[in-house]
Amino acid sequence: MPQEFLRFYERFISPSPDHISIVGRNYEYLVVSYAYLKAHGKSREEIVGHKVPELLGDAVFKNFVKDYLDRCFAGEVINYRAWFTFREAGRRFMNVTYYPYLDYDGAIAGAVVMARDITDYRMAEERLRVSEEKYRHLFENLNDAALLADIETGFIVDANKQAEVLIGRTREELIGMHQSKLHPPGKAEEYRGKFAAHSVKGRAADYDGEAIRKDGTIVNVRISAAPLSFGEGGRILGIFRDISDRIEYEKALIDSKNRTESLIRSMHDGFSMFDGERRFVDGNPAFFNMVGFEKDELAGRKAPMPYWPEEELPRIEAAFSDLEAGKEGDYELVFRRKDGSLFPVIISPFAITGPDGNILNYCATVKDITLRKGLEAEFIKSQKLESLGRLAGGIAHDFNNLLTGIIGNVSLALFYGPDEKVSGRLKEAEKACNEAKRLVRQFLTFSKGGAPVKSTLFLENVIADWCSFVTAGSKSKCEFSIAPGLLPIEADEGMLSQAIQNMIVNADEAMPSGGLIKVSASNASSAKDRPLGSPHVCIRVEDSGAGIPEADVEKVFDPYYTTKEGGSGLGLAAAYSVIRNHGGFIEVESAQGKGSTFSVYIPASPDACAYMEMKPFQAPSHKGRVLVMDDDETIREALGEMLKGMECEVESARDGAEAVALFKEARSEGRGFDLVIMDLTIPAGMGGKEAVRRVLEIDPAAKVIVSSGYSDDPVMSDYGKFGFSGVISKPYKAREMMALVGRFLNGGV
């Protein structure tokens, strides 16, 4: 190729910013531009006249460049883009074109290689691609439906997956659809107007609306629309959020509010509300009934309220302060009704606060606890009785043991029939012992400790004797009224007679100058118009004394409460406990100056036709062997004498273990016992409860009587359940024990 032409061409291409080179068919560089030299960091002499492999390396030449050059030498124009690494320019993205280079004769003499640096364009293109991918990713993965509409025409140009789900149409169906078709037909114009406002004014907006699905169902949506600017023109981006759940929640909230208001109105407890300035706002009907004020009398009134007693104001102020400090709790207060009467309440206050934490309303539920206070008083009364009962039980056990020995020996001496002078003294001693016995029983029975040992009892046969015994020698007189057909009851005669006698004593003492005590007994199915649930017998004791002050009526059954000088206060307390332990209750009606009426209600016998005939004492028809077990030597000796007087053979034991050993030994020798009498409680030893179990293991047919001064032990009231054949309470008289023993030795039970 003529050198002058190459030099001309070189002057022409050297200033070009592109990388230009002419390569001969022998792969030798003929011409290179200045930009080519600069990128490779070479001088012209280092490139021109040298072959391509020398500059680019054999590997690059053979695997990449040679093929392009050969194809260009064959007449092909080649274009491609690729990354290249230059010595000086570094890594650049180039657009490369190979043109055949022709000589004067038109023959291909080489190749013109033109490479343009388009790295910046490539980077901008990459940034645009990444930006489009981000937009598409964001657009597609929004949690809400997104639709892009042309701002001029209103036609949808794009939609994401959530839009397909919300509208129930595919992306292909949505693209090209007018935006107004997204809404119910009747509201198309409304939404066209909103779309136009965005288009003309270029403003964003948020509003609640409706969208229509392909199947025609309506969806409540929150629409956020904003105009966007793209190279190809303006767009409106609409974000649609399904708010069906929110709408349902708001409806449920309204329903809940209505239900809450209805519930508050129907509450049995009171409810009151104050505003943040402590002005009364409202209350429920129960509250207004409780305090006796109408809403109009309280609404808008600022604290203190007329139903707050002055002495309670500091505590009520403290309750408000606690709420302001974030504390909640219950407060026991006293409120005052409009009529001036006071009643106890428990208030449970709480505060309703706003978003800023300030209190909007002070609220409180108000419970009238008058009934609860009465029950608490009853419970405290019962606790007093129970505590005293535990103390009484321990004392009474030891005292009853002493009395048993004394009464047994006295009654035994009388049974032997001493001379008249000694007999008179013994009778007085026996009378004193009986009084001591009655006092101990009274001490026990006003408490829980007096568990009754019941039998069927016909009151018409005994009630007159009980009452007349008390008024003998008194200025008062009893008048009796017994209704015909009076039902029998299950009762401990001794305990019940004592309870009724205590009430007669109380009535007699209420009339110091004497008077008439009216005693009546009748069947009852209700008390003060309150159904009893089962047949009861009512015993009513009515006096015409001074009456009981209203404030003291609830105290009359308290232990040691008395208004009488020198009184013990145990009489009515004991009566209360006896009646309670018989499954009954006592009601009191009294007014000062008009006397008092005590009404006792006791359940009738489950078998009203039952009649337990008391058999008279029969002397034993044969001699019997009796084993006596008691830790008290005096009782063992006295009881032994009683039994020997019945011609019985007696052996004794100090505790259950000794008694079981004697019983086993006697049976093995063929001289078993016909009857065993056991003390229930043996301190630091085996008592009757364990001993009877072991005796029955030896002889299941054995007859065993239990005796104890502890009337509260369940064994005494349900002795058969524990294996005993009979029961007798300490202290007892000789004839009582002899009658019981006689029935067993004669085959009775």
Image (spheres, rainbow, N blue to C red):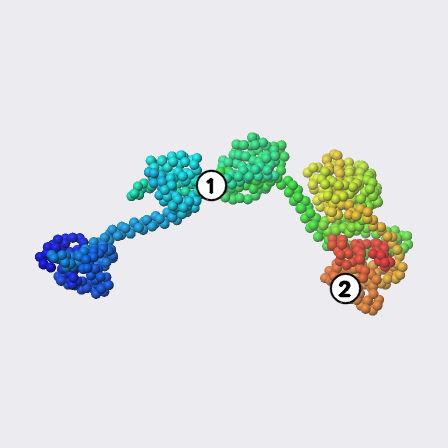
The x and y percentages for residue 389 are: 71, 51
**Residue that label 1 marks:** 217
The x and y percentages for residue 126 are: 29, 52
The x and y percentages for residue 287 are: 59, 36
The x and y percentages for residue 493 are: 80, 48
Q: Residues within 10 Å of mark 2 (few under 14, many from 20)?
A: few
Within the image, what quadrant is residue 115 found in? bottom left
Identify the residue at horizontal 25%, vertical 57% (top origin). Answer: 83
Identify the residue at horizontal 84%, vertical 54% (top origin). Answer: 736
Which is in the foreground here, disc 2 or disc 1? 1
Tell me, yes or no, if residue 634 can be seen here. Answer: no
User: What is the three-letter code of the residue carrying label 1?
Assistant: Thr
What secondary structure is found at the residue carrying circle 2? helix
Who is closer to the viewer here, 631 or 597? 597
What secondary structure is found at the residue carrying circle 1? loop
Q: Which quadrant would the C terminus be assigned to in this image?
A: bottom right
Asked if residue 69 lies left or right of residue 644, the reply is left
Asked if residue 499 lies left or right of residue 228, the reply is right
Total labels drawn = 2
Within the image, what quadrant is residue 51 found in? bottom left
- In the current view of this chain or complex, which residue is farthest to the left? 4
Q: Is residue 436 above or below residue 64?
A: above
Tell me, yes or no, if residue 48 can be seen here. Answer: yes
Within the image, what quadrant is residue 531 found in? top right
Identify the residue at horizontal 62%, vertical 38% (top origin). Answer: 343
Identify the residue at horizontal 77%, vertical 52% (top origin). Answer: 453
Tell which circle, 2 or 1, labels the residue nearer the N-terminal end: 1
Q: Is residue 149 above or below residue 668?
A: above
User: What is the three-letter code of the residue carrying label 2?
Assistant: Glu
Who is closer to the viewer here, 79 or 305? 79
The dot on residue 697 is 2
The dot on residue 400 is none
